[in-house]
Amino acid sequence: MITSIYRYSHLVLAAISSLFLVVAAITGLVLSTEPIFYDLKQPDKIDLSEISLGQTIHKLQQEYDELITLSTTSQGLVLADVVTKEGTSVTGYINPKTGMFLGDEITRPSIYNWFTNLHRSLFLKSIGRGFIGVSTLLLVLIIVSGIFLLAQRQGGFSKWFSSIKDKEFHKKYHVILSRWLLIPILIIAITGVYLSLEQFDLIPVENQSLDWSLSPDEELLQQTIENQVFFKTTTLDQVKEVNFPFSSDPIDYYEIYLKEKSVLVAQHTGEVIDQVENPFTALISYYSTIFHTGSASPLWSVILGISCIGILYFIISGCVIYWKRRPKKNYKLELSSAQDSEYIVLVGSESGSTYAFAKAFTQQLLSTGKKVFLCDLNHYQQYERALHLIIFTATYGDGDAPTNARKFFDKLEKIDQPRSLFVSVVGFGSSIYPKYNEFGKQVYHRLVKDENMKPYLPFTEVDEEHQPEETCKQWLQLWQQKSGFPMELKVDQFSKSNIEKQKFKVTHRSPLNKDETFIISLQPTSHNDYQSGDLLEVYASETAKARQYSIARIQNKIVLSVRKHDHGLCSTYLANCHKNDDIMATIKTNTSFHFPKDAPKIIMVANGTGIAPFLGMLDENKTNIPVDLYWGGKNIESLSIYGEYLEDAHKKQQVSNYHISYSRENEVVEYVQHKVAEHKEQITIDLLQGAVIMICGSLSMQNEVLDLLELWNKENPEIQLEQLYKNQKILTDCY
């Protein structure tokens, strides 16, 4: 939870202050060149720590008729206001060793005045200063939250400079620059906040003045100034300003402002008449100005300029990172609010035609002027104004609900609708499975049992094996007849696009092992852009419907793990293939299940042939991102066909830990979800530190793992399961 608070605060603060910070960073970058400008224009500097104040004043007394003021600049030069022996008033730089005049004081270019006003107040005077001050304070908070986020990302402050696993340009250099620039940027921000508070008189000031009424000690001997103790021991680097006496009267003193105190000094004896320590706030103000402007050191001004560039980069890269991380709307499309809509369309679908049809149907409803809300079945809730509840859902596994519908029945039991609803349910499935459309049937029967739920159309089954488009059209016609809405839905709005079949040559097929599983390797006959986690749609014959298998890409070959089913047309076809045979198939991109190269750690959970895409992803792990692999099979022999791939990954340090379970090897039945439960503490820590958990295999296994995560979420709210889904930290591809 703490990590999430830091992340949320970091994002909100950055969003609020970004515009002002962009202005401040650009103007700060320009102003950071000013010390360099002065350094190039000014005379050669002399080390002021080696010259006493008495030496310099003595030389000035010899060189000029009258001395008025002397001061040092933040660049380490000496300015003097004097009157020459010819009676001419001169102000400019002097050589502190010789007293010779070096040149007029450099006039500040007007461009720096313009940028200073923009930097301080946006030309809005006090209001603008307030905006800049608040933005600078927000920058402090952004940096503080960023420090903790970076430490958490690296695995602790002790690993601050450890290797960076992110390979994406913006993320990588966001971390690299953060490690080096957070401290100077924090200095800029803190000093900027202090100077803003000082400008608005919010810093308490101790007003202490020197007492000019005090008299000198008349018994002290008069000495030349270069021999007086105070002037002899005070070096020029300690001096800010000196106001010289106007006359030779003993009570007309030197008024000297040092960096740490103010002093009245008798001009003939060097006696310290009075001194006042500078208040702590004055010291803070002095050093805040020095560090904020870089005026004391061209090198520091360069660091400030780089830091300003860094701030601009952080804003840009932060926007890019946020844009790429923003939750992607897969099944939830909020067209009108749930409470204002008359038509509620709910979807249960892992991917594909079910959702496509639901979206197309929703768009047609919208075109009639109706208020519609579309989301997944897991987000079922009360609907204040709804008249119709329309559900499109697929069935997975052994009559199981899709992932985004697994909470529906629980919510249905707990939620009472405030008004009666007309119900329509369409089930999408494949008749080759024993429990064809079982989940859709259960949804329909559970709903119509409720006296407040009235059937609008009979339950309709869409069989992917037999003219699914025609069935969808027929259902839509029934809806049009019943509702009277002029809806024109084209088939290509929800049907799968026709992808040209390609030839793939078999390069290897392993024998069937004890549990009827085997490995088959294929070589594309034409160039294909594909990744591990994509899907290969295999056609066993010209008329048969394609079957999908998860791809492992290893050494530019497609590797599939297949279990031969007794009545499985496609699995039997692949099991009978031999080396150099050609098969017809198409590759379907599955972007939601690719190897997450920007993750600090990956947890892979699979059972049976679900390990296939992970074998390819391990091979893809060239940067050695820590990977924990959890796999469950029937027995030791079940693992044997994957041995060479796992050994290779282990040698290359592409996998960190294996956690293997067997359901039929020992007397104790152990499934992969049991292994996951055993490592609850470590997985919780990993998820809190940004790890990605990937699940591939049977839908029942997936649901049990997700049940575990939900249980842990209740025990430890910091896990924030919903946020993990939104940020794509939980990736699934199950069947």
Image (cartoon, grey):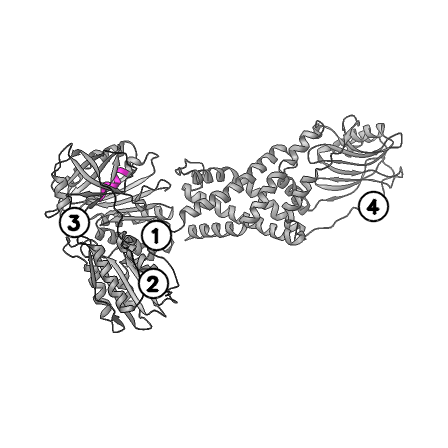
Marks 1/2: CA–CA distance: 29 Å
Q: Nearer the viewer, mark 3 or mark 2?
A: 2
Name the residue: 33% across, 58% down.
714
Marks 4/3: CA–CA distance: 96 Å
For this orientation, the residue located farthest to the left is: 566
Q: Nearer the viewer, residue 238 or 465?
A: 465
- Asked if the residues shown at circle 4 and circle 1 are in contact, with their CB atoms under 8 angstroms apart, the answer is no
- Check disc 3 and report the residue beneath it: 669
Marks 3/1: CA–CA distance: 30 Å
Q: Is residue 398 visible?
A: yes
Lower sequence index among marks 1 and 2: 2
- Per the image, label 1 sits on a secondary structure element best described as helix
Residue 725, label in figure: 1
- Check disc 2 and report the residue beneath it: 365
Q: Nearer the viewer, mark 4 or mark 3?
A: 3
Marks 4/1: CA–CA distance: 74 Å
- State the image coordinates of residue 114 (x, y, percent, origin top left): 67, 43
Start-end of magenta stretch:
610-616
